[in-house]
Amino acid sequence: MQFGYVSPEQIMKDRADYARKGISRSRSVVVLQYEGGILFVAENPSPSLHKISEIYDRIAFAAVGKYNEFEVLRQAGVRLADLRGYSFDRVDVSGRALANVYAQTLGTIFTQDPKAYEVELVVAELGADESSDEIYRIVYDGSVFSQDGFSVMGGPSDQVSTHVRENFQRSASLEDSLRLAVDALGRDEGGEVRQIATTQLEVAILDRSRPRRTFRRIRGAQLESLLSRPAEDTAEDDTADRDTTETPPDETED
């Protein structure tokens, strides 16, 4: 029996096409900066199978694609961050180092394993101020990109990213940034806009006002309140909240 020759270029192309098709079938995730930190919003009907998670004190992880594949990567990242923080110092754990490890892992899997991982990842690190925030996007073949202000993965990413790019403001409030992300997630490939229920959303932030563990989830009544609050009242309410409100209740934390 004779076997046909397949060039390395064709093998890589087939693997890339396979991974891209799998990722495009997933629901989108939007990661963007806002005035108080970094916001993560995903369309996710599951209340327990998270696309967004904490990695370390000021580092968070978001992913699209096959859950079992990116969950393995997430757990490996948590173990690596914990080990590095324990062996050296907590400040030695960085988002850039973690993104590089993920890039090397996905690159090795893409070139050596029979099947590429159908995943895309974002690793975001909260800085001391807005200018020092870092957002890295890692794709299925191990390529890593530093994102300026926001990143979009999965689903109709072109339509979603176009809407975010046209309306993004780095200094926007949490409410305005959340509305922008949800509106963008509702953009379909055909240009139609659909409403996404709050029960279908997974939302979390890296909150710069927190001293160390900055990651917290936003859900339930708090999420509904943020989405329903009139835009013109946002600035006044934000000022009042900062003056009178303590850290959000534990039910919003991971």
Image (cartoon, rainbow, N blue to C red):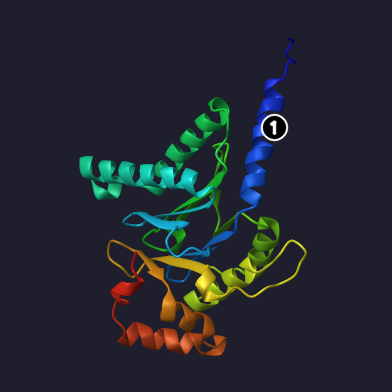
Q: Which amino acid does label 1 sit on?
A: Lys
Indicate the position of residue 3 as horizontal and vertical percent values: 72, 14
Q: Is residue 225 above or below residue 144?
A: below
Q: What element carries label 1?
A: helix
Q: Is residue 24 left or right of residue 63?
A: right
Q: In this rendering, would 75 be left or right of 176?
A: left
Compared to 249, does 126 lie above or below?
above
- From this viewpoint, is residue 171 visible? no
Q: Which residue is drawn at 57% across and 28% down?
A: 114
Name the spot of residue 149 as percent of width and height, x first: 54, 60
Give the crowd class for mark 1: few <14, some 14-19, many >=20 residues within 10 Å: few
Q: Image check: 58 left or right of 46?
A: left
User: Does the rendering let one see residue 228?
Assistant: yes
Expressed as whole percent of the image width and height from the top left, the position of residue 169 reads 57, 70
Q: Residue at x 74, y 61 (%)?
A: 189
Q: The N terminus is located in which quarter?
A: top right
Q: Which quadrant would the C terminus be assigned to in this image? A: bottom left
- Residue 185 falls in which quadrant of the image? bottom right
Q: Name the residue under label 1.
A: 13
Residue that protrudes farthest toward the right in the picture: 190
